[in-house]
């Protein structure tokens, strides 16, 4: 029933918008007949909203009809708070969120949804538990971010930066009653600030009107992957004048050829990282580069790249996991095609929590709504001793 109601409401709104667009195109005022029809549409939409509101109230009343013993145990276990599902999402927030997107609940009464601070945006912020689930999923599907050294602070942050040849703090023998001579490895500082970015995902209204579709799961997946793709690109490739990521890394080796990698070069790259940083080291490359590495053999005619389901990402080179990213460049002259090492040598800083907002009206003429995620972050190398790169020979 709700699907039919939503479709009827969307059709009415579309009809009203068409009337307005026609008058605008013809550069004229609305006719009396058109004004009458617009008023009729508004009355019908108001009636639909009132009916949906009544159904929501009935639904809420029905949820209060619970067994008294179960209610008592629930109150004792969690202090009266609503139980969350396996993803940590409050069911009331899920229901309010989906009702708002589907148009069953007006913007002003979107349950637990917090209205946007910008009334012109035509949107509402996604509930906290759903946002937290999106953030967790971003970390789950973005090992570059998950394995990096993370900072969550506002403003600028200066982090000590150790170059690849730094010995950090020197330790020497001492003699009793003789003052120690202080010394430390050469280091500089890298400044992490914050760059604002937004991820926009459009959702078809036809899909939304399908009441059997897991709308929350779809929004979570789409937003998480959109944010993941952006963050991963910036961490690996960077953007000039913005986030640097691994693009400033100098530690590494240069291949002998412009279009091919050798097994010896992979061994040299691995051994360019000290043993103390090898435990959590991984390889990072593009799918095409992994295919090239899959064909390489050692001097005993054994393939260097092995399938190993016991390791993260399912494949390994010289015993270390191989992570494949579409953001990495393929083998080409002068390109940094492989990174290797412990990603704790890469810092990521978020200046504010990720905010995700639903925009229901902005893309009405495209028969879709949009979810937009805002984040402010920066990323840079803070310890070159933990990371190395393979650069193809310049042409």
Image: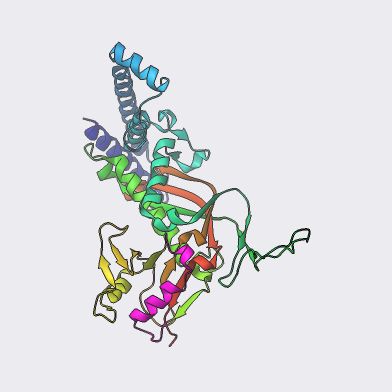
Relative to the observer, which residue lies in front, 198 or 366?
Answer: 198
Relative to the observer, which residue lies in front, 73 or 329?
Answer: 73
**Residue 8, image x and y in percent?**
25, 35
Which residue is the extreme one toward the bottom? 395
Residue name at image x 39 percent, y 39 percent: 130
Is 275 within the magenta?
A: yes
Is 104 within the magenta?
A: no
The boundaries of the magenta stretch are: 255-279
- Residue 236, by quadrant, is bottom left
Relative to the observer, which residue lies in front, 309 or 330?
Answer: 309
Residue 153 left/right relative to 231: right
Q: What colour scheme has been applied to the protein in the rendered image?
A: rainbow
Number of numbered discs on residues: 0
**Residue 111, image x and y in percent?**
40, 28
- Residue 157, by quadrant, is bottom right
Residue 250 left/right relative to 335: right
Residue 183 left/right relative to 19: right
Relative to the observer, which residue lies in front, 251 or 64?
Answer: 251
Q: Is residue 344 visible?
A: yes
**Residue 14, image x and y in percent?**
31, 42
Q: Is residue 71 above or below residue 126?
A: above
Q: Is residue 362 visible?
A: no
Q: Quadrant of the N terminus?
A: top left
Q: Is residue 70 above or below residue 89?
A: above
Q: Quadrant of the C terminus?
A: bottom left
Which residue is the extreme one toward the top? 68
**Residue 57, image x and y in percent?**
33, 20
């Amino acid at each position: 029933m709700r699907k039919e109601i939503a479709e009827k409401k969307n059709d009415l709104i579309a009809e009203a918008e068409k009337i307005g667009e026609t008058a605008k195109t013809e550069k004229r005022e609305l006719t009396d007949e058109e004004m009458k029809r617009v008023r009729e549409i508004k009355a019908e939409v108001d009636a639909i909203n009132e009916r949906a509101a009544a159904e929501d109230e009935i639904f809420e009343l029905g949820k209060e009809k619970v067994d008294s013993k179960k209610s008592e145990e629930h109150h004792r276990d969690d202090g009266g708070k609503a139980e969350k599902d396996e993803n940590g999402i409050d069911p009331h927030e899920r229901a309010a969120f989906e009702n708002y997107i589907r148009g069953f609940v007006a913007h002003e009464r979107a349950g637990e949804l917090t209205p946007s601070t910008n009334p012109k945006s035509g949107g509402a912020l996604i509930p906290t538990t759903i946002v937290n689930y999106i953030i967790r999923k971003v970390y789950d599907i973005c090992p570059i971010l998950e394995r990096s050294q993370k900072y969550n602070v506002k403003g600028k942050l200066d982090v000590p930066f150790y170059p690849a040849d730094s010995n950090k703090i020197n330790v020497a023998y001492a003699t009793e009653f003789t003052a120690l001579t202080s010394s430390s490895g050469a280091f500089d500082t890298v400044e992490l600030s914050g760059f604002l970015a937004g991820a926009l995902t459009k959702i078809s209204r036809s899909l939304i009107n399908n009441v059997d579709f897991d709308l929350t799961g779809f929004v979570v997946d789409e937003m998480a992957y959109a944010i993941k793709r952006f963050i991963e690109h910036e961490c690996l490739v960077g953007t000039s004048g913005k986030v640097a990521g691994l693009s400033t890394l100098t530690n590494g080796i240069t291949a002998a050829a412009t279009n091919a990698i050798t097994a010896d070069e992979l061994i040299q790259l691995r051994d360019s990282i000290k043993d103390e940083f090898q435990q959590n080291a991984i390889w990072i490359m593009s799918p095409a580069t992994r295919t090239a590495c899959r064909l390489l053999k050692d001097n005993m005619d054994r393939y260097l790249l092995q399938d190993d389901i016991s390791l993260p990402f399912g494949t390994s080179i010289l015993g270390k996991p191989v992570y494949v990213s579409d953001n990495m460049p393929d083998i080409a002259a002068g390109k940094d095609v492989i990174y290797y090492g412990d990603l704790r040598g890469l810092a990521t800083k978020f200046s504010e929590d990720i905010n995700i907002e639903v925009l229901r009206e902005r893309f009405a003429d495209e028969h879709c709504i949009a979810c937009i995620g805002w984040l402010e972050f920066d990323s840079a190398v803070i310890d070159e001793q933990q990371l190395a790169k393979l650069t193809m020979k310049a042409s």
